Image (cartoon, rainbow, N blue to C red):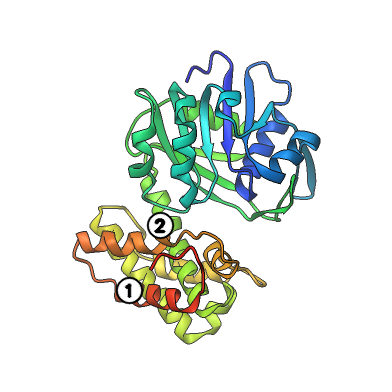
Amino acid sequence: MNLTQKTRIAIAGIGGIGGYIGGKLAHYYSNNENIEIIFIARGEMAETIQKKGLWLESNETSYECIPNLTSDNPLEIGNIDVLIVCTKTFSVEEIFKKYHKNLATKAVVITTQNTVNGEKLITPFLPENGVLMEGSIYIASNIIEPGKIKHLSGPAKLFFGTDGIEDNRGDKIAKIFNDAGIDATFTHAIKPTLWKKFLFVSPVAVVTSVFKISFSEILENTEAKYLFINLTSELMQLAKAKSITIDDNTIINNLNLLKSFKGNVKSSLQLDLEKNKPTEINSLVEYIIEEAKLFQIPTPHFDSAIVELYSKYDNIYLKK
């Protein structure tokens, strides 16, 4: 990636997260001579954006977002200098199989998935001088209708970076984000940040799905709270075995974090299971069980929870 020349930034997956990031970038860099924004989208979302653009509502402000191009055709998309992947985990491999040849020689790939095992999947698709910068975003943002994204009140914070690799491209991309109004931080030690979020996201996804309750109801249900604590504990053991730096107060911090959620907030895993959609159960649950076996760490609560999930949901995408 050469940021002294025109930089082409593509956002794959224009949903709640991709719509926010892509929307902010497209709005700010509209008609910019040095930066071109591409939305990789399809179906009704793509058709609406092509005709009317994307509308982003964020903290009581509406943004009209017109990207330079909206397409899912690799030939039409052409060269990509920065690829920001905002799809769900189960779609990541499909994205790279379809668009990896579009990546420039020194392309930067930034991820936003709720996972800690993206490196193994993505690295084989990188060009020779390309770099993966895994990311984690804290945001509540949803699709209201095709072509319209709403960032709910509250902060939106993106962390992205490498695992011990010095690379000044990250600082330059962070500036591109921040200039567009996206609160972004680049780091050379991304793993602890990824795991901090994963230590909350995975247990809360499992518990809300098993008990079919909202985030706030976990603390009101003794069995649910017990499962949440024990899942977090098992995941902490795995993180420590992998030499990931984590906070010893993670369980207390996560319980306090649950208190901040109001109303009927459900996990994406729970919603996908209920709506009979493809789920991220592989990266949120099965990955943990299999990885723990390699380190001889028992995971009795994850083991029993996944059995319950398979028995409670008639979801055609669950592989038994």
Q: Which residue is mark 1?
A: 303
Q: Residue at x 48, y 29 (%)?
A: 171
Secondary structure, mark 2, is helix
Q: Answer with the quarter of the image where residue 154 lies.
A: bottom right
Give residue 114's position: percent from left, percent from top.
47, 53
> Which quadrant of the figure contains the C terminus?
bottom left
The type of residue carrying mark 1 is Asp
Picture coordinates of residue 310, whole percent (x, y): 43, 74
Q: Can you see residue 135?
A: no
Left or right of residue 33: residue 74: left
Residue tagged by mark 2?
A: 283
Q: From what the image shows, is residue 198 above or below residue 177?
A: below
Left or right, 246 with respect to 159, comes to left
- The tag earlier along the polypeptide, 1 or 2, is 2
Residue, x 63% and y 30% (percent of image)? Answer: 38
Q: In which quadrant of the rendered view does residue 44 lie?
A: top right
Can residue 209 be seen at all in this image of the molecule? yes
Marks 1 and 2 in Cβ contact (< 8 Å): no
- Count neighbours of disc 2 (C-alpha within 10 A) and say few if under 14, some if 14 to 19, many if 20 or more: some
Q: Residue at x 36, y 60 (%)?
A: 247
Q: Farthest bottom residue?
A: 222
Q: Secondary structure at mark 1?
A: helix
Amino acid type at circle 2 is: Ser
Relative height, residue 59 to residue 66 (above, below): below
